Amino acid sequence: MSEPTSTTPRDFIREMVERDVAAGRHGGRVVTRFPPEPNGYLHIGHAKSICLNFGLAQQFGGTCNLRLDDTNPETEDQEYVDAIQEYVRWLGFDWQNLFYASDYYEQLYDFAEQLVRLGKAYVDSLNEEEIRQYRGTVTEPGRPSPYRDRSVEENLDLLRRMRAGEFPDGAHVLRGRIDLSAANMKLRDPLLYRIRHATHYRRGDAWCIYPMYDFAHPLSDAIEGITHSLCTLEFENNRDIYDWLVDTLPFPDPPRQTEFARLNLTYTIMSKRKLLELVERRLVSGWDDPRMPTLAGLRRRGFTPEAIRDLCDRVGVARANSTVDVTLLEHCQREDLNPKVPRVMCVLRPLRLVIENYPEGQTEELDAPYYPHDVPKEGSRKVPFSRTLFIERDDFAEDPPKGFHRLSPGREVRLRYAYLVRCTSVVKDAAGEIVEVRCTYDPETRGGSAPDGRKVPGTLHWVSAEHSVPVETRLYDRLFRIERPDLAEGGFDEYLNPDSLETLTGSRLEPAAADPALGERLQFERQGYFFHDPIDSKPGSLVFNRIVPLRDSWAAEVKKQAPAPAPQPAEPKKAKETESKAPAPLTPEEREALEQARPQLLPVIQGVIAAHPKEVERYRAGQTGVLGFLVAQVMKKGGKPNPKLVNALLVEALG
Ligand code: ATP
Ligand code: MG
């Protein structure tokens, strides 16, 4: 068992498991599983479940199985099975056992016959629509199907003939005989088996009846001796069926289901069905499109497993659904890369800069460290300097707006690691576009400081025109324009962000950084963290994906451009809810402070939420006024947190 450290997350599930182990429940064993259905690629929401299930097994010296929950022949595929394994490993976990629900079909079928013999299941011959009508409503109890009282013999006979393929799809189903008046509609004789004449990717045509999730999942858990079956909140009502099954059939030590909140991220969607639609309609380039929230997409973009695990730890495991700001993921990624990667210079959108008083044909090499002072790593390279350079197009303004700290006519700036240069004139093309900036340099300022101590407004990155290497850079933005595309009903086309990918084919990289041996990830100074695209980047034609910019420019950009308000999701009620709960917008600095404060504040906030269920309920019912009370409770716990940040975190945690 690994010793809990100060970074071991604490949450209600870990506490429950700890109590179970201490009480000797399940013989003190901890057996979990991660049970994806192989009908799509894993997304970052799955990462939360993976970290939780595998993390628990590690923490308590237990076992975690990878189980492919493959009971739907129409949607599943070996490609997905392979990808699931690949990405669980990539995230840094390994399984003790690899299991497939489709290997349990024989056992599951035997359980079905056992239930029939116990009088606990029957074959129903109503059609789907009739079954729905007979089930009743929340206010009316269900009515028994005319087939509910078939004899055990007749049920067994029909079930065997269903299996033998005597009936077409939909002719019959197997249902549990539970309780037609149960308040929980799920208990009103749930479907356990259906007929599907379809070829399964592993079992071929061996079966033409397939178990439903509600039947296969609990029993697969029981077969594997799972102790703690963890799933997301939407399965809360299914828990009664779960318990009914594992308690009705003779399992000596049945598993128990516990639900936790799904991970949702702003500006993206987390449903495999919708992600599949993006892929199939070619709205993205594939499951590994760097804008996708899939682990494949995140890896291709350059995100690291460390950052994704860190995000899952920081978000924690709670019972309240919430949507995590995607800037938190970006923050985790910066924290991970900041102490690791070399800083180099790359000009994304080059503008030619000619130094009039620097001799033609002359070159010198300037020393430049790869790491800043606060990163305890060594290393430096030589950067070639010459008469013709490139600077960033954005770093020059002929008519600078107020507060512009970069280059403009008459003004002097520092070229990083090099000299101070002063702009003397510009050259324009026939269309009036600036094609070249002319400067003079001060030879006394080598290294970047003036002997007379004079100050300049800014420092620019640059590359030497003849020495730099042309590269392609790909800049990514949010896939959707609205914060909660998951709430938008209907097609999501109108919410896709048309500017989510910008490809720059003419970027220029300093020569030392073109050597892939320097690292697959680099910081381009002032531009962000970049990753050699693992598929398209080749020696001689390098392609870099921007993983994240250096600061959270998003909030600032939105404010600056003040565009027409983003369209609200079509579903009016939910859209209104999100609106009324939206915190006052945070400045970029506040956002950064929020991410810093989150690890300390979140447990306090979760404690307050747990301690005040009535207020939380009132808040969720729309009485947002109680927020002030909850903020005050958090403030009382001490530590002098900033109330605005507490407010924002509370709103987020309350979902
Ligand atoms: P989706 O709704 O995206 O299709 P799913 O729940 O249908 O996901 P599964 O393959 O059944 O996908 O999920 C495997 C496991 O991952 C389940 O235990 C599920 O509860 C969990 N899981 C899925 N999505 C999330 C999420 N967003 N956050 C946390 N856990 C998740
Ligand atoms: Mg599902």
Image (cartoon, rainbow, N blue to C red):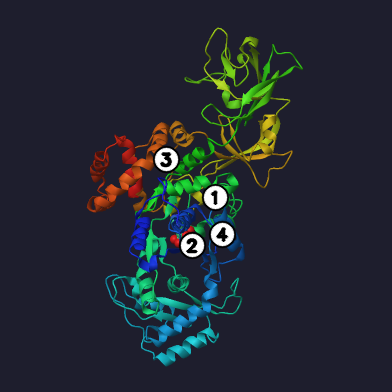
Residue labelled with disc 4:
84
Residue labelled with disc 1:
292
Residue labelled with disc 2:
64
Instruction: Say the numbered circle drawn on residue 176.
Output: none
Q: Secondary structure at mark 4?
A: helix
Q: Residue furthest right?
A: 361
- x and y percent of residue 432 in the render? 64, 22
Amino acid on which the number 4 mark rests in the picture:
Ile
Distance in Å between CA atoms under marks 3 and 2:
46 Å
N-term mark: 3 or 1: 1
Amino acid on which the number 2 mark rests in the picture:
Cys
Q: Secondary structure at mark 1?
A: loop
N-term mark: 2 or 4: 2
Q: State the residue at coordinates (70%, 33%).
A: 470
Closer-to-camera residue (305/58): 58
| Image position of 645 with respect to 238: above or below | above
| Image position of 200 with respect to 632: above or below | below
Residue 491 visible to the viewer? no
Amino acid on which the number 1 mark rests in the picture:
Met
- x and y percent of residue 228 in the render? 40, 64
Classify mark 4: residues with Cα within 10 Å, few (<14), some (14-19) or many (20+): many
User: Horizontally, is 169 left or right of 438 in the view?
Assistant: left
N-term mark: 4 or 1: 4
- x and y percent of residue 479 in the render? 52, 46
